[in-house]
Image (spheres, grey):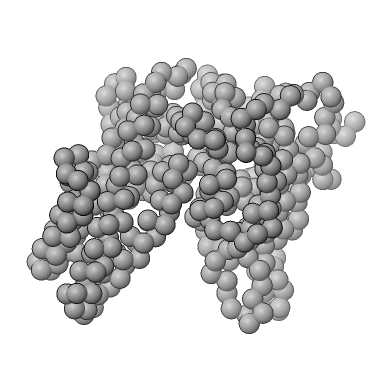
């Protein structure tokens, strides 16, 4: 049976706080294991519970699509369609899907939606559409209205992961503050792919390659500047003591980062171009800059690098960084993030789990939790919005139905 978790006795309703951001309504159609679902919400924490495979992460993924990129699973748009529709696609069934939300923000309410539509010509859609208040918009425009951050079990050890994974994690944090960062990354990656292809195929004249390297240098310096600015601010915020969780120190390592400390940006661009040309003439593809940055996180109490810490401490450190990032957005921006914590609480001991509930309760953005064990959310459910899920449906418990 479908239900709205906001339908509760009046004594459980709370005054809506000013300066907060939350989804007031989420509707999905043809998405993952959901044929159709619509739920009304208020600003309080959202707790999704149910067995594995019920669709908890799918709902979080739907919300994550409000952010630039491919969402928390980094899936292709065609992979998000309801599986029964995909299976029947050759028979002419629809592969379209959509996610729509209503939002409350300090700047006022708005509606947004994203998804893909069927192509009359039968071509596979490559991009998802975005609309804000009924008008077609870009991912950057939507990111200027709402920020979404998330943490999944796959990200538990990201601070000790290979440098490329750490860069991807950092860039996601940067985009929340600077949506234009997404475009810089796309331009850099496109030029890098073209340059590598030309070098692999041993074709392309020097002028062509130099133009691509100039684009990589210009975009790369802008990427480095944005990363360095966020890491500096996030380092200060994450180093502040919080209950139970370790404080973290963050910095960036890299040759180009060192140049940025002592040289004007235009000179760094020139240096990157020179180094790229010299490497190319040696038969190498390497290029200093955005693709060589290394995010380093350390435990501020012990000074130990995250990559040398236990898996439990790595998880605690990344939670500290995500919470610091959310606090920083609340302090500096008018769009504190919607925070999605997918199956995070269940892997913490009781002391850290309760601290997580308390710390997220201080944030100005709506926080979503998920887990299979309803009991671990017992205290949070009393004041939050509990949504039990089974097989792509919200369900009423026996107690709720009384």
Residue beneath the point at 66% across and 72% down: 118
Residue 100 in view (yes/no): yes
In the rendered view, tell whether residue 59 sits above or below residue 96.
above
In the rendered view, tell whether residue 177 sits above or below residue 94.
above
* Position in image of residue 325 (x %, y %): 45, 33
* Position in image of residue 115 (x %, y %): 63, 61
Q: Quadrant of the N terminus?
A: top right
- Viewer-nearest residue: 255 or 90: 255
Q: Quadrant of the C terminus?
A: top right
Q: State which quadrant residue 18 falls in.
A: top right
Residue beneath the point at 61% across and 47% down: 63
- Viewer-nearest residue: 211 or 194: 211
* Position in image of residue 103 (x %, y %): 67, 43
Residue beneath the point at 58% across and 29% down: 364
Residue 312 in view (yes/no): no
Q: Count the labels in the image.
A: 0
Residue beneath the point at 19% across and 74% down: 207
Image-based side of 83 in relation to 312, left or right: right
- Name the residue at the bottom extreme: 121
Image-based side of 374 in relation to 272, left or right: right
Q: State which quadrant residue 226 falls in.
A: top left
* Position in image of residue 243 (x %, y %): 47, 17
Q: State which quadrant residue 205 falls in.
A: bottom left
In the rendered view, tell whether residue 84 sits above or below residue 63.
below
């Amino acid at each position: 049976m479908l239900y709205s978790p906001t339908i509760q006795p009046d004594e459980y309703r709370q005054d809506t706080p000013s300066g907060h951001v939350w989804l007031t309504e989420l509707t999905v159609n043809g998405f993952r294991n959901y044929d159709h679902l619509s739920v009304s919400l208020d600003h309080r924490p959202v707790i999704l519970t149910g067995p594995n495979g019920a669709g908890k992460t799918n709902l979080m993924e739907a919300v994550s699509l409000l952010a630039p990129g491919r969402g928390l699973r980094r899936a292709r748009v065609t992979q998000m369609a309801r599986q029964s529709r995909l299976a029947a696609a050759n028979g002419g069934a629809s592969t379209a899907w959509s996610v729509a939300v209503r939002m409350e923000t300090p700047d006022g309410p708005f509606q947004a939606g994203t998804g893909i539509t069927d192509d009359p010509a039968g071509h596979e859609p490559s991009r998802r559409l975005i609309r804000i208040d009924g008008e077609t918009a870009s991912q950057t425009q939507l990111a200027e209205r709402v920020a979404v951050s998330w943490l999944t079990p796959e990200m538990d050890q990201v601070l000790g992961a290979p440098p490329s994974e750490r860069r991807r994690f950092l860039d996601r944090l940067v985009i929340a503050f600077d949506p234009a960062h997404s475009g810089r990354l796309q331009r850099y990656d496109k030029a890098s792919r073209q340059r590598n292809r030309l070098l692999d195929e041993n074709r392309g004249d020097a002028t062509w390659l130099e133009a691509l390297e100039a684009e990589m240098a210009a975009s790369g310096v802008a990427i480095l500047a944005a990363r360095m600015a966020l890491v500096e601010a996030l380092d200060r915020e994450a180093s502040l003591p919080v209950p139970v969780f370790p404080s973290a120190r963050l910095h960036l390592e890299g040759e180009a980062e060192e140049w940025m400390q002592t040289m004007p940006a235009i000179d760094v661009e020139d240096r990157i171009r020179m180094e790229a040309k010299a490497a190319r003439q040696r038969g190498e593809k390497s290029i200093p800059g955005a693709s060589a940055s290394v995010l380093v996180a350390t435990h501020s109490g012990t000074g130990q690098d995250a990559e040398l810490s236990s898996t439990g401490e790595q998880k605690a450190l990344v939670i500290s960084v995500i919470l610091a990032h959310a606090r920083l957005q609340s302090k500096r921006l008018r769009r504190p993030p919607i925070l999605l914590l997918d199956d995070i609480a269940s892997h913490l001991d009781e002391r850290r789990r309760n601290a997580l509930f308390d710390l997220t309760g201080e944030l100005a953005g709506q926080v979503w939790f998920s887990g299979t064990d309803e009991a671990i959310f017992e205290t949070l459910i009393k004041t939050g919005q509990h949504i039990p899920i089974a097989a792509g449906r919200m369900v009423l418990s026996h107690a709720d139905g009384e």
